[in-house]
Image (cartoon, coloured by chain):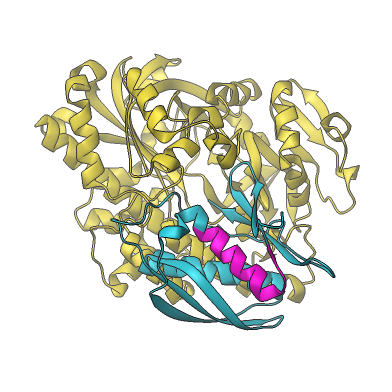
Chain colours: A cyan, B yellow
Amino acid sequence: MKNQPVQIIHHTADIGLRAFGRDLPEAFCQAARGMFSLITDLRKVRATEKIEIDIAAEDSAGLLVAWLNELLFYFDTRQWLVKKCDIREINDNRLKASIWGEKVDASRHRLKRGIKSATYHMLNIEFEANKGYSVSVILDI
Amino acid sequence: MANNWKTMIHKIDDVRWEIRKDFKDGMLVPGRVYASEAMLGQIWEDKALEQVVNVSFLPGIVGASMAMPDIHWGYGFAIGGVAATRVKDGVISPGGVGFDINCGVRALRTNLSAEEIRPRLEDLVYAMFSNIPSGLGSEGKLRISEKELDRVLSKGAAWAVENGFGEAADLIFTESNGCLKDADPDKVSQKAKKRGLPQIGTLGSGNHFLEIQSVDQIYDRETAHAMGILEQGQVLILIHTGSRGLGHQVCDDTIRIMNSAVQKYAISVPDRQLVCAPVQSPEGKDYLSAMACAANYAWANRQCITHWVRESFIKVLKKSPRELGLEQIYDIAHNIAKIEQHTLEGKTQTLCVHRKGATRAFSGGHPELPAIYRNIGQPVLIPGDMGRYSYYSVGTKTAMAETFGSTCHGAGRLQSRTAAKKGLKGSDIRHKLGQRGIIVKSDSMSGLAEEASEAYKDVSEVVEVTEKAGISRKVARAVPMGVIKG
């Protein structure tokens, strides 16, 4: 588990992710990378373009869903793949981040599957003193 | 939760099972599952029964929280879930519709025989593949303005017909004539419209598909005849898609609103994905208006695709539309909430019927059905997986009495996507199907592996349960010949 920042949660119709991080920004970033690695091979994505993200939600779990769905929005409308992210500010209701990635290039990127949305089903954020944060989310495929 | 399904669920008869109201504190109605005993072990392991229990907590729910035999673990509602709430004091839950609002199926019949098109099958599949945008990130070939998109959201399939995509008769053979009247484009966010704009007229990805089929069984000649299904070997077309990113965004936007609504109206739900608001509240009404827009978008989408299917057949086979006889059998939604009248305990009530992976199955005599189907009942289209077969059924009086006029929607997944892919390669699947004469075209080989036959229940077992329970009646069966997977 140490070397695995993201685990797959098996779900019949959809796919879940459990992401780990020393702090919440790291866990959220890992969840984002985990989600995009379900869409394509992240090794082939370049961090050439930057987008600023500023989102709000009712609590930190809601923020996780809103964060992932915001990234899916860019994927849907701009065909944009996320390579890395820097969450600069996060509290219970607000998240500010920079994300780096690039537009899909059919000559280099093979898209594996689409993701409709992050869901609230089994949504969970846990903290353990020595281990840090683990965040779980089920994605509607 | 119980440690074994037998301690949780009680047998009513061979295909009906009940989770009693006293199983868990907070249940407002019992749970009812339509399944064979053999299916229950899998359904139990899948956590789907827990979701049937959770749905029974929704305020204003009547009858039972129901699961059709293709039930499997979803998010919030189980897929295959049916729940009706009273409009006057009950709730509407976007989780009871899902992200892909009005994901549904449309079937077309033809005058063609499988034998006749076999030599041109590959050309037909390729023509449709190039004519109908499919796959992940595919953009449509329709370029419309935001203003025009609002007209799509208001008018649904009729917008497509007015713009030259299809015929007026198609609308008659579409659930709700392809348009929900509550639609108000102002209730759809800019974000949702932005997602929807480039995707109109696209098949999408995942389990969405386009299939050329051949009829292999007819169970009821007279009813099949009314549906335009005349003989074995006749070619049919099945289109499965929904409201694309626009619907997903409407659901996401609404769940955020409903997160506050549950606090405002002091509603407690066991799963956050089940958040809801009273049907009559501003939040509930706004959702109904936005959902109607997404539903209309999906109907316009299937209408455009229908037109391109016809175009492809005309081009490849060089026959006139009249010779081809490519007419619509029916179009149904299987992720939707509808305001309907149902008789409950002898009284007519106005209900909000949530069908999440379930199909409307109105019986003969229902005023919403086109004249041609008024005697036989509403056609129910039940796609199986790409390696087996699909069923054409009709709604029944039992469905009206027991399931608010609903039945199953497909095979139902058996294996997770991740499990399905282990040991299976998309290219092998395509090769294996090819050996059986089934031509498959997909942009994504890995997506193909996730949709392998093995990942699904045998749809015939699902249909058998609906048959025994009497909630729909099978009319014909068709096998795949050519498949385009999104």
Query: Total number of numbered labels?
Result: 0
Locate residue A88: give its quadrant.
Answer: bottom right
Front residue of B207/B71: it is B207
In reply to whether residue B401 is colored magenta, the answer given is no
Front residue of B299/B367: it is B299
Can you give x and y, in whole percent of width and height, for residue A138 in the image? 64, 55
Q: In the figure, B138 relative to B434: above or below? A: below
Can you give x and y, in whole percent of width and height, for residue B414 in the image? 61, 33
Locate residue B57: give its quadrant.
Answer: bottom right
Front residue of B269/B289: it is B269
Q: Residue at x 28, y 69 (%)?
A: B148
Which range is magenta? A20-36
Q: In the figure, B30 relative to B163: above or below? A: above
On screen, residue B306 versus residue B219, left or right, reads left
Q: In the figure, B78 relative to B4: above or below? A: below
On screen, residue B182 versus residue B122, left or right, reads right
What's the magenta bit mostly, secondary-structure-wise?
A: helix
| Residue B101 visible in the displayed image | no
| Residue B105 visible in the displayed image | yes
Q: Residue at x 33, y 66 (%)?
A: B197
| Location of the N terminus of chain A (image quadrant) | bottom right
In reply to whether residue A31 is colored magenta, the answer given is yes
Q: Residue at x 77, y 40 (%)?
A: B31
Q: Residue at x 32, y 48 (%)?
A: B134
Can you give x and y, in whole percent of width and height, for residue B71 in the image? 64, 37
Can you give x and y, in whole percent of width and height, for residue B26 in the image? 86, 54
